[in-house]
């Protein structure tokens, strides 16, 4: 019972952060999706220690585990737009493929940069 309440509390906390991000994006007319802004907000809260990882770990783990479930409405929406996909499928595929490759390259470059930076911080010094 305690774990269920903890799970619901964590989902409510994540939802509250999302709702705050929706409010901020709409109020300030920020041209970023509220979900993306919410992730940045959550990252900032976690980085500054305002929210500890254990406050959201069970709820976030559940959401991450069932992430594919949240894409079902998108798949259904694509089925409704079948004519658009047939007419512009090649262009859509090229845009999705290109943006995926760009995203992967940026992520790989950033990961490589950060791991090199982290390695330099933990490398033993030869000054002895």
Image: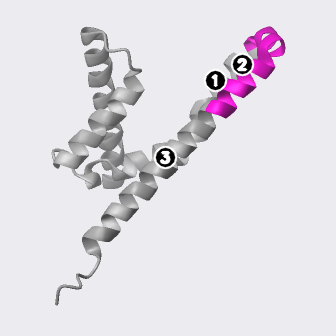
Whether residue 81 sits left or right of residue 87 in the image: it is: left
Provide residue 32's location: percent of width, then percent of height.
39, 20
Mark 3 in CB contact with mark 1 (< 8 angstroms):
no
Q: Quadrant of residue 30?
A: top left
Provide residue 121's location: percent of width, then percent of height.
25, 69
Provide residue 82's location: percent of width, then percent of height.
80, 13
Mark 1 in CB contact with mark 2 (< 8 angstroms):
yes
Asked whether residue 12 is in view, the answer is: no
- Secondary structure beneath label 1: helix
Q: Which residue is mark 2?
A: 78
| Foreground: disc 3 or disc 1 | 3
Q: Residue furthest right?
A: 86
Does label 3 or label 2 sit earlier along the sequence?
A: 2
Residue 42 vertical position relative to residue 26 in the rendered view, above or below: below
Of 68 and 124, nearer the camera is 124
- Badge 1 density bin: few <14, some 14–19, many ≥20, Cα 10 Å: few
| Foreground: disc 3 or disc 2 | 3
Q: Which residue is mark 1?
A: 74
Count of numbered badges drawn on the protein: 3
Q: Main secondary structure of the magenta part?
A: helix
Of 90 and 9, nearer the camera is 90
- Badge 2 density bin: few <14, some 14–19, many ≥20, Cα 10 Å: few
- Find out whether residue 83 is within the magenta segment: yes
Whether residue 19 sits left or right of residue 86 in the image: it is: left
Q: Which residues are magenta?
A: 80-98
Residue 62 vertical position relative to residue 87 in the rendered view, above or below: below
> Which residue corresponds to the image point at 23% horizontal and 85% vertical from the top-left?
126
Provide residue 116's location: percent of width, then percent of height.
38, 63
The residues tagged by marks 3 and 1 sit, at their Cα atoms, a distance apart of 24 Å
Q: Which residue is mark 3?
A: 107
Q: Quadrant of residue 92?
A: top right
């Amino acid at each position: 019972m305690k774990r269920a309440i903890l799970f619901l509390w964590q989902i409510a906390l994540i939802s509250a952060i999302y709702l705050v991000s929706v409010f901020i994006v709409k109020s300030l007319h920020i041209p970023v999706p509220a979900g993306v802004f919410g992730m940045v907000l959550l990252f900032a809260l976690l980085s500054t220690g305002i929210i500890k990882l254990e406050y959201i770990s069970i709820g976030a783990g559940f959401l991450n585990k069932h992430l594919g479930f949240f894409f079902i409405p998108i798949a259904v929406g694509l089925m409704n737009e079948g004519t658009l996909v047939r007419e512009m499928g090649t262009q859509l595929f090229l845009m999705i493929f290109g943006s995926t490759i760009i995203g992967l390259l940026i992520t790989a470059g950033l990961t490589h940069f950060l791991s090199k930076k982290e390695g330099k911080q933990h490398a033993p010094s030869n000054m002895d």
